[in-house]
Amino acid sequence: MHFKNRYTQVISAVIFSILLFTTIRLFFYFSYFDYFGDLTFIETLKSFFMGVRVDVALIFTFTSIIWLILLLPFKFTTNKIYRSSLGVLWGAILGGIIFFNIGDILYFGFVNRHLNNELSLIGNDVGILVDMVVDFYLIQTILGTIFYFTIVYFFYKVFGSDIQNKTIRQREWANMLLVIIIAFIGIRGKLDGISFGTSDAFAVNKVSSGNLALNGFFCYYRGGTINCTDHSAIKSDQAVQVVKDNLASEKFEFMDNNFPLMRKLKPTTKNNYNIVIIMIESLSARYLDELAHNNFKVTPTLDKLAHEGQLFTNFYANGQRSQEGITTIYTGLTQPVGFENLGEGLELYNPSYLGEMAHKNGYSTLAMQSSDRGSFRVDKLSALAGFREYYGAEDIERTGEETGQPNYGAWDGNSLRFLSSKLKTIKEPFVSFCFTASTHSPFYSPGKQWEKYPHDVKSENGFLNTLNYVDTQIKEFMEASKKEPWFDNTIFIFTADHANQTKISNEKEVKLENIYLPEFHIPLIIYAPKLIEPKRTDIISSQGDIVPTIIDILGWQNNFTTIGSSLFDESVKNRFAFVKMGSIVGLSDYDGSIFYNFKNLISKKGSISDENQQLLLSIDSAQAHLLKNSKWMKKD
C-alpha cells in the first residue's frame, strides 16, 4: 500500500472511514430488516444517504484535528513513525465509536430506538452492565473487541505506508486554510442555521427513516440538550392555552394565571384510603391474557385482578426507560426532550411530587425496589418525591424457594414478602411503591417450577417464565394482604415501567384495533374490591394520569401540575397519551398516532385528528416553556 502524497493518504483514510460506517449501517439494516419494512426502496436509499451525512459529521468532528496535524507543512510530518502513530490514534477513535455503535445496535433490539442519554443513568449499575456484557453478549463483545483492534491495525498500516511525494511547498499554508474550511463545514453538517442534529436526519417523515440514518454515538454526542432542542413549534401562549383546554374538567380548577397549568381538586370528600403501587418491570399489555387474549397462560393472578378490578385496555407508558416511568408516576411529568433527568436537574423546575403530597395529607410513605438501593437511582428519585422510607435489595432477606442469583438485586418474591412485612407495621393511611426486577433481561430463571416454556435467558420464553414467577409472587402477596386489617381500605395499582421489547419468538399480537403505539402499550389494573366496581374501560390513558387519579380518589386538596387527567373524571372531553421515544415525542388518541422529531410531524398512523396533532406540539412547547421559566408549579 502506498500513496501519491499526504493529501491522498488522508482523503483515502476519510473514505475508508465512511465506508466502514456504511458497512455498520448495512449490518444494522439487515439485522432489523422487518423493522425497516415500511420504507420503500427509494426511501431506504435516501435514508442511507442521510446516514452518510451523519457519519461525515462524526468522522470530521473526531478526526479533523488529526488531519491538520498530518498535513502541517513541516518536514517532520512525513516521518513514518509520526504518521503511523497518528494512524493508531485515528483507528482508536473510530474503532471506539464503532464499538459503541455495535452496542447500540444490540440495544436497538430492546426499544426500537438508539441510545440517547442512557449511559448517564448507569449510576450504581455498572456491575450489572458488566455482567450483561460478559454473560448476555459475550460472543458479541469478543467479536467487537477483535473488530476494534482490526480497525486500529488497519489505520496503523494506512498511515505507515509509503508516500511517494514528500515535498513541502510554500502554497501548502493556503491549503491548510482550505482543509480547515472543509473540516468546519463537515463538522456542522450544513451551511446555515444550527449544526446538523438528530432531527435533521429524517430523509422522509417516518421514524424508521431517522433510525436508519442515525447511530447511537451521534444521538448520544449530538442529541438534544436543553440549549439546542427547539420547543417552539407552537407559540408558548397558544400552546399553554391548547393544553389547558384539553385538561379542563368539572372536577379540577386552574389556580393561578402565573402558573397556568397548575390545578387543584375542587372541594370534595376526603378518603383516607391506602395506596399500593406495584410497578412491574417490562410488562407489555400483550402478555395479559385477560387483556390481549394471546393465551400465554403466565399471568393468572393479574388476569384475575384485572377481571375483578378496573382494567384499562388503552394504557400507555410515557417513555421507554425505567427512570422515565418512575419519573412520571412520581411527578405526573413526562420528561421533555433535552431536559435533565429527575435527580440530575429536572427537580430544579419544581415538579409535583406524589410522596410529598401524601405526606402533607398525613400519609406514611414507603418506596422500594428489588434491585440495589441505588440502581436506576431510584433511591434518589424516591427521596426527591417525598417518600420517607426507602428500601432496596441490600435490605431484603432471602426467604423463598428461588434458586440461583438474580441479575438485579433480590428475587421479586423476597421483595414482595419484605413489602408485606413493612405494610404490617406502617402507620395508616399510607402510600407505598414497589418496583420489581425479575422480568428484566437477561431472564435468569428463579427455578424449574416456574418454567412453562423452554427457558432461555435471551428470548421471550425466558421472559414468559420470569413473568409467570412474578405473577405467582403477586398471588402470594395479595393472599397475605387480604388477611390484613387494612386490606378493605386499600387501593392496589398494578402497572409497568415500560413495555417489553424482547424480540417476539411467535406471531401472537395484541388484537385490539385501536392500539396505535404498541411499543408503549402496558397494562393498568386498579383493584379495590370493597371500594371500586369491576370494569373494563377502553379510554386512552397513560402513566401521566396516575397522579391526578390518586388525587381524585383520595380527595387531596393539593396544588399540582401534570399533563394528565383523573381516570375517574367523566367530564374530561379529550383523552390522549403523550409519549417520549428518545429524542422524539408522540401522541395517540382513539383514532391514530403521530410523532414529532422537532422538525416535522412523522409516522402518522390511523386518522388522528388535526386538533390532536396540534396538541402534541402544544404539550411539548408548553412543558418546555413553563419549566424553563419557572412557571410549572408554585413553590409552597
Image (spheres, rainbow, N blue to C red):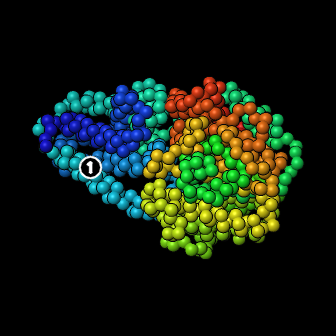
In the displayed structure image, the side of residue 141 where residue 510 appears, left or right:
right
Q: Judge the density around disc 1: few (<14), some (14-19), many (≥20) Cα neighbours within 10 Å.
A: many
| Viewer-closest of 455 and 238 | 455
In the displayed structure image, the side of residue 282 where residue 482 appears, left or right:
right
Q: Element under label 1?
A: helix
- Image quarter of the N terminus: top left
x and y, in percent, of residue 136 in the image = 41, 60
x and y, in percent, of residue 85 in the image = 24, 50
| Viewer-closest of 427 and 340 | 427
Question: Could one spot residue 161 in this view of the protein?
Answer: yes
Residue shown at the point (51%, 73%) measured from the top left:
403
Residue shown at the point (65%, 64%) measured from the top left:
475
In the displayed structure image, the side of residue 320 where residue 590 appears, left or right:
right
Residue shown at the point (72%, 52%) measured from the top left:
309
| Viewer-closest of 364 and 154 | 364
x and y, in percent, of residue 524 in the image = 66, 49
Question: What type is the residue that disc 1 sits on?
Answer: Ile
Instruction: Examine the image and state in which quarter residue 15 appears.
Output: top left
Q: Which residue is under mark 1?
A: 151
x and y, in percent, of residue 461 in the image = 47, 57
